[in-house]
Image (spheres, rainbow, N blue to C red):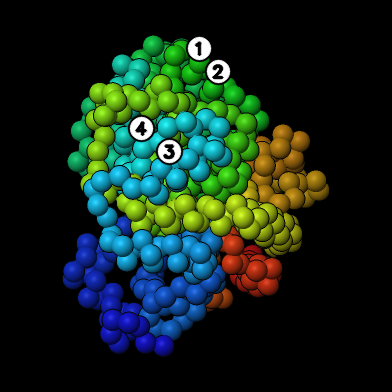
């Protein structure tokens, strides 16, 4: 197999990349794999083929956007190609951005206005400004282990008492206004509101933590957030960049959990594999954005026609082809199979995920009994024998065997031709083009690797 650009081997390519790109990559998580990242030549359904010709069953799936797999289905490909042929972009409105907005509004209850931007990071940066501008307050409460992109407001670590920027270059003043609390901890969020309620513009959370293992909400947690925000005049913002149009299908995770946030950020799936972000919510709040309001937001590439058509046709295809039933069934089959393997070979580990998201968390403590566990991934069921042991927060996930996961388990799965996200924290995704056979082969790979190391 030769790649389209030249005949360098992967190690030669990485050697060149280290001299031309910072750390050899354009996003730091891509540098994780040892000894070198795989340079991908092309995608093929549920597989990727690297520039050395190795073929892997892929569960990275672009870190979430590729709900339909690597090949655009014919109607998506046709619409995207036609749009590109017409000319890439205009800087002037087009019909397709209205249509994608209407599609989202039709399917997501809490949204009646949208603004499209170009990445999840842009969406959360803009939503922070919007929440602050609309409420006239500065503090935003976030979850420890939550991820909302790489910008000043959310690169913050710590807790209500002490916090600091998590990156060099972020002024400490930002950390003052961003208050991390442990996910799923009702006492902690009540305490923050008691101490700072009148200063809190918003609570921002992923409905399911998807960037620090996968952690589902315990029963009642989202309702508590909703009530506290209502009582204190703060906004509830769901970051559905991963979960949007994946968890809960077209109604998104907020539909699945039956919670109406005031504002929602989207990205990943709604761009059909092209760069995208969006902010959506109640009209009254959304109109605070320019040009109708005074919260500045603008972008040359906002509502890019190629992205808009890819997103629209992807979502239409998902709607017309029962995509969510297919990917969720496969997700369930995979998690249930993993649960069986774990019970036999690694009872201390936790199977996590929901819908088409999954991860095996290398937690450390074995439950007393293996009977009556959540059968297809931890759902935070209080009467599960593992309930006290399964991760409730990002910190619980980080307390697992993260080095074993990354240095021993991940490469062993690569040897089985299964490509997982290269650390314990990033979610993995099943797509429309994965098959039952793919899932069964994946389970065999887990079985082989886990029976060897335990
Ligand atoms: C990926 C992600 C982001 C950032 O999106 P980018 O498009 O990578 O900037 C923000 N929030 C969540 C929940 C994400 O998963």
x then y, percent, for residue 88: 28, 60
- Please give left or right for residue 56 compared with residue 327 in the image: left
Q: Residue 127: which numbered mark, if any?
A: 4
**What is the C-alpha distance between the residues marked 2 and 4?**
20 Å
Quadrant of the image occupied by residue 181: top left
In whole angstroms, how far apart are the C-alphas of marks 1 and 4? 21 Å
N-terminal of the pair, mark 1 or mark 3, is 1
Mark seen at residue 231? 1
CA gap, disc 3 and disc 2: 20 Å
Look at 54% across and 53% down and name the residue there: 316
**Residue 349: x, y in percent?**
63, 53
The reply to whether the C-beta atoms of the residues labelled 3 and 4 are less than 8 Å apart is yes
Q: Is residue 419 visible?
A: no
Q: Secondary structure at mark 3?
A: strand
Q: Secondary structure at mark 4?
A: helix
Which residue appears at 71% of the width and 59% of the height?
333
Label 3 CB-ligand 1 distance < 8 A:
yes
Nearest the viewer among 435 and 291 is 291
Q: Residue at x 45, y 77 (%)?
A: 49
Q: Would you call the spot at circle 4 few (<14 residues within 10 Å), some (14-19), or many (20 or more)?
A: many
Secondary structure beneath label 2: helix
Quarter that holds the N terminus: bottom left
Asked whether the residues under the numbered discs 1 and 2 touch, taking CB atoms below 8 Å apart as contact, a structural biologist would say: yes
Q: Earlier in the sequence, mark 3 or mark 4?
A: 4
Mark 3 and mark 2 residues within 8 Å of each other at the beta carbon: no
The residue where tag 2 is placed is: 227
Most foreground residue, 451 or 192: 192
Neighbour tally class for label 2: few under 14, some 14-19, many 20 plus, Cα within 10 Å: some
Precedes in sequence: disc 2 or disc 4:
4
In the displayed structure, 320 sits above or below 187; it is below
| Residue at the spot of label 3 | 265
């Amino acid at each position: 197999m030769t790649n389209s650009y030249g005949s360098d081997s992967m190690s030669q390519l990485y050697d060149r990349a280290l001299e031309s790109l910072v750390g050899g990559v354009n996003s730091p998580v891509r540098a994780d794999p040892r000894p070198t990242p795989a340079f991908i030549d092309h995608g093929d359904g549920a597989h990727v083929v690297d520039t050395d010709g190795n073929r892997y069953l892929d569960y990275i799936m672009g870190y979430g956007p590729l709900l339909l797999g690597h090949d655009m289905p014919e109607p998506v490909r046709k619409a995207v190609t036609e749009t590109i042929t017409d000319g890439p972009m205009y800087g002037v409105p087009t019909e397709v951005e209205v249509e994608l907005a209407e599609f989202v509004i039709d399917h997501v209850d809490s949204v009646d206005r949208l603004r499209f931007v170009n990445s999840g990071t842009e969406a959360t940066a803009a939503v922070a400004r919007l929440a602050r501008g609309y409420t006239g307050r500065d503090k935003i409460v976030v979850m420890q282990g939550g991820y909302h992109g790489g910008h000043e407001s959310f690169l913050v670590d710590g807790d209500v008492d002490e916090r600091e920027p998590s990156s060099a270059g972020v002024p400490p003043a930002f950390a003052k206004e961003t208050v991390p609390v442990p996910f799923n901890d009702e006492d902690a969020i009540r305490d923050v509101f008691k101490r700072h309620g009148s200063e809190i513009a918003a609570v921002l959370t992923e409905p399911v933590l998807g960037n620090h293992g996968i952690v589902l909400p315990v029963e009642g947690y989202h309702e508590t957030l909703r009530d506290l925000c209502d009582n204190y005049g703060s906004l509830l913002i769901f970051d559905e960049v991963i979960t949007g149009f994946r968890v809960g299908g077209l109604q998104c995770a907020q539909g699945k959990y039956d919670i109406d946030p005031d504002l929602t950020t989207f990205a990943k799936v709604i761009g059909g594999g092209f760069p995208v972000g969006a902010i959506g919510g109640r009209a009254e709040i959304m109109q605070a954005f320019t040009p109708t309001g005074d919260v500045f937001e603008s972008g040359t590439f906002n509502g890019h026609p190629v992205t808009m058509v890819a997103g629209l046709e992807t979502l239409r295809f998902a709607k017309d082809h029962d995509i969510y039933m297919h990917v969720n069934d496969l997700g369930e089959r995979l998690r249930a199979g993993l649960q069986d393997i774990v019970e036999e070979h690694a009872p201390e580990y936790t199977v996590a995920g929901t819908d088409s998201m999954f991860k095996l968390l290398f937690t450390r403590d074995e439950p007393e009994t293996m009977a009556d566990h959540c059968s297809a991934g931890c759902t935070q069921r209080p009467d599960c024998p593992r309930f006290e042991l399964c991760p409730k927060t990002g910190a619980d996930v980080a307390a697992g065997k993260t080095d074993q996961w990354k240095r021993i388990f991940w490469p062993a799965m690569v040897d089985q031709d299964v490509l997982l996200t290269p650390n314990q924290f990033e979610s993995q995704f099943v797509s429309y083009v994965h098959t039952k056979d793919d899932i069964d082969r994946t389970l065999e790979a887990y079985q082989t690797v886990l029976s060897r190391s335990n």
